[in-house]
Image (cartoon, rainbow, N blue to C red):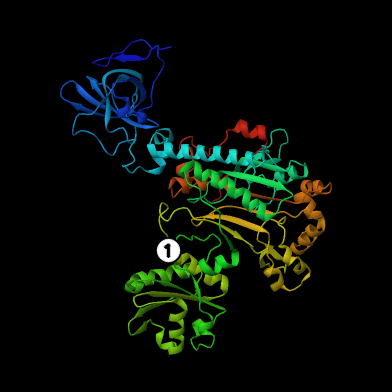
């Protein structure tokens, strides 16, 4: 084994290892209280600044931060060399302290430097002030990880995981690992599949979630299960989505919806406290209907106003054809009357792309409302609109008329476009959204389309509607499903499960799922339920998303050690890649030629 190089006064090439071990302190921990103490610190050379012919200042970096080391003649040290520095902590000379650096009042002097590993010139500087192409960053992710920001993010993630595990254990949950090679089950997204070498032509699927297995744990009398689960879904990537993700997954027996919300709240509180050192307090509840009515979204960002206002009644007798719609909604933008026409045209184009038939804008001025459609509206309608929205002189009104869901959707997106604060603004606003619809639409075949998986328990007050043949009654049914939202991001979802076979058969019947089809798709779970299933409920939330928001990141890639690009590639390893002919033969596979 090569001994570490030792230098004193100049960079030497040979030397002996220190009997004291590799280091006595971390770079970022040294303060004025350490003055006069001899220390050993290890890390990477972040910067080297020469002063005169022999003197050099070396900024040494490890995961805790930087410390300035004064080295006599370290001219051969280059950026990203790995070194061990032995020296004495001293105050920096008057006028040279760096107030922006936690260690900025001290430096290490009288240094001996041991070169532990050299470095080629790096493809980009390890400096967060420099913008670097993301593909280049991910190709050399091991270099990217050296930056203080990513080091901090990984440690935030570790703290969150530790806090979650402790909170779940304290609440009587048992950590259980579920399989990664499973049968393909319908869960809403495409499966990643794995060919079986021992059973040619057959495939495993990678789990989109441990849903069925955690329910089987309840049948197995585990009572309270959890795991920090790895899940995989083959769906388009975006800022809050990766193929691979981690979630806190839990299930409990003999509990109600309220119990699950309280248990998850405890875990969330522990995670936030571990990172922010504050308790978030009780998480408020809001029904799905209220969330859609007020914010136009089932994952509302409640950090800011611009709430939707229902003004349908104002135009109940209108002569203006565009407002003769089942729903007319508006948002009032305070001080927005000076919005330029080009910006208004842009907002109109966006609204149309999002599904609106059009967007009506109105400037509230001292002498009335200025809008291209004002001449089509009566004085009573304009007055009623102003009163309903609370608009004042200088405000801007934006209106959409359509079916209720469409008006909510379009104005909800416009609201975010106009007012959503940055990820680091407005604090952490958690919200439970409850009472989701059981069905979201009626399909072409007349069967209702489930809003969740078919094992979601209907709301107790709506069970009688299962016998109705009226589509409006079915669409009015609520489920015992719930989502956890943070600053407009859906962290996760869960539900009370159907454990009563009679209710399950009725749900399958409504969905047009025959007994044979149900057995084929969910047989191993339904078979287990024949042997006594307890009432149970569960939840899962994305740890990547929670950590990103706690770290102040807009993209979950910044809190994942080795993420994929937006296109799903891995520049570091080259995945996905082709298999050679021998591997394909062993698996009994053939690759089709590219489509022409």
In the displayed orientation, state which residue is furthest to the right.
531
Relative to 316, residue 352 above or below: above
- Image check: 55 left or right of 133? left
Residue furthest to the left in view is 52
Residue located 51% across and 69% down the image: 355
Instruction: Name the residue at 33% across, 19% down.
Output: 115
Q: Is residue 222 above or below residue 119?
A: below
Is 378 situated above or below 416? below
Residue 481 position by quadrant: bottom right
Report x, y in % for residue 155.
47, 36
Residue 431 visible? The answer is yes
- Residue density around tag 1, few if under 14, some if 14–19, many if 20 or more, within 10 Å: few
Element carrying mark 1: helix
- Give the total number of marks visible in the rendering: 1
Q: Quadrant of the N terminus?
A: top left
- Locate residue 250, reporting x and y percent: 65, 45
Q: Quadrant of residue 517?
A: bottom right
Q: Is residue 552 above or below residue 304?
A: above
Q: Position of residue 81 (x, y in %)?
A: 33, 24
Read off the residue under disc 1.
Answer: 417
Residue at 41% in and 42% down: 135
Q: Is residue 189 visible?
A: no
In the image, taking residue 538 as reference, residue 64 lies left or right, namely left
Q: Nearer the viewer, residue 473 or 188?
A: 473
* Residue 56, position as x, y percentages in the image: 22, 24
């Amino acid at each position: 084994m090569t001994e570490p190089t030792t230098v004193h006064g100049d960079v030497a090439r040979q030397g002996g290892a220190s009997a004291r071990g590799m280091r006595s302190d971390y770079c970022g921990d040294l303060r004025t209280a350490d003055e006069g103490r001899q220390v050993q610190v290890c890390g990477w050379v972040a910067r080297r600044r020469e002063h005169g012919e022999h003197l050099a200042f070396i900024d040494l970096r490890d995961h805790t931060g930087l410390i300035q080391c004064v080295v006599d003649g370290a001219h051969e040290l280059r950026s990203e060399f790995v070194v061990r520095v032995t020296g004495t902590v001293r105050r920096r000379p008057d006028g040279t302290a760096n107030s922006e650096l936690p260690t900025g009042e001290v430096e290490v002097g009288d240094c001996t430097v041991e070169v532990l590993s050299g470095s080629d010139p790096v493809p980009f500087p390890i400096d967060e002030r420099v913008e670097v192409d993301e593909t280049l960053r991910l190709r050399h992710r091991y270099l990217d990880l050296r930056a203080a920001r990513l080091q901090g993010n990984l440690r935030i993630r570790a703290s969150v995981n530790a806090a979650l595990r402790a909170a779940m254990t304290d609440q009587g949950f048992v950590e259980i690992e579920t399989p990664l090679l499973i049968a393909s089950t319908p869960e809403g997204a495409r499966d990643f599949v794995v060919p079986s070498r021992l059973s040619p032509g057959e495939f495993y699927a990678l789990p989109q979630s441990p849903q069925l297995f955690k329910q089987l744990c309840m049948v197995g009398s585990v009572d309270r299960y959890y795991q920090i689960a790895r899940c995989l879904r083959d769906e388009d990537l975006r800022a809050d989505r990766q193929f691979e993700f981690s979630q806190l997954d839990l299930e409990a027996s003999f509990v109600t919806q309220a119990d699950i919300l309280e248990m998850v709240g405890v875990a969330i509180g522990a995670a936030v406290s571990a990172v922010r050192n504050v308790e978030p307090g009780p998480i408020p509840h809001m029904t799905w209907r209220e969330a859609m009515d007020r914010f136009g979204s089932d994952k509302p960002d409640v950090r800011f106003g611009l709430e939707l206002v229902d003004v349908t009644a104002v135009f109940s007798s209108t002569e203006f054809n565009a407002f003769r719609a089942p729903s007319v909604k508006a948002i009032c933008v305070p001080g927005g009357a000076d919005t330029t026409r080009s910006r208004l045209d842009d907002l109109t184009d966006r609204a149309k792309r999002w599904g609106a038939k059009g967007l009506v804008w109105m400037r509230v001025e001292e002498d009335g409302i200025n809008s291209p459609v004002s001449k089509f509206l009566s004085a009573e309608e304009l007055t009623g609109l102003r009163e309903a929205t609370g608009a004042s002189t200088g405000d801007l009104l934006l209106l959409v008329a359509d079916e209720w869901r469409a008006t909510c959707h379009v104005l909800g997106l416009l609201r975010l476009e106009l007012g959503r604060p940055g990820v680091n603004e407005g604090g952490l606003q958690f919200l439970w959204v409850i009472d989701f619809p059981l069905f979201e639409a009626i399909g072409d075949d007349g069967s209702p389309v489930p809003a969740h998986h078919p094992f979601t328990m209907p709301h107790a007050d709506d069970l009688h509607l299962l016998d109705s043949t009226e589509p409006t009654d079915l669409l009015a049914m609520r489920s015992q499903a719930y989502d956890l939202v943070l600053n407009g991001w859906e962290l996760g979802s869960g539900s009370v499960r159907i454990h009563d076979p009679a209710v399950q058969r009725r749900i399958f019947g409504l969905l047009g799922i025959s007994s044979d089809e149900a057995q084929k798709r969910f047989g191993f779970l339904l078979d287990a339920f024949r042997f006594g299933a307890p009432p149970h409920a569960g939840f899962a939330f994305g740890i990547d998303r929670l950590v990103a928001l706690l770290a102040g990141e807009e993209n979950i890639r910044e809190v994942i050690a080795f993420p994929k690009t937006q296109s799903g590639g891995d520049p570091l390893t080259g995945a996905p890649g082709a298999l050679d002919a021998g591997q394909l033969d062993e698996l009994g596979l053939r690759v089709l030629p590219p489509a022409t």
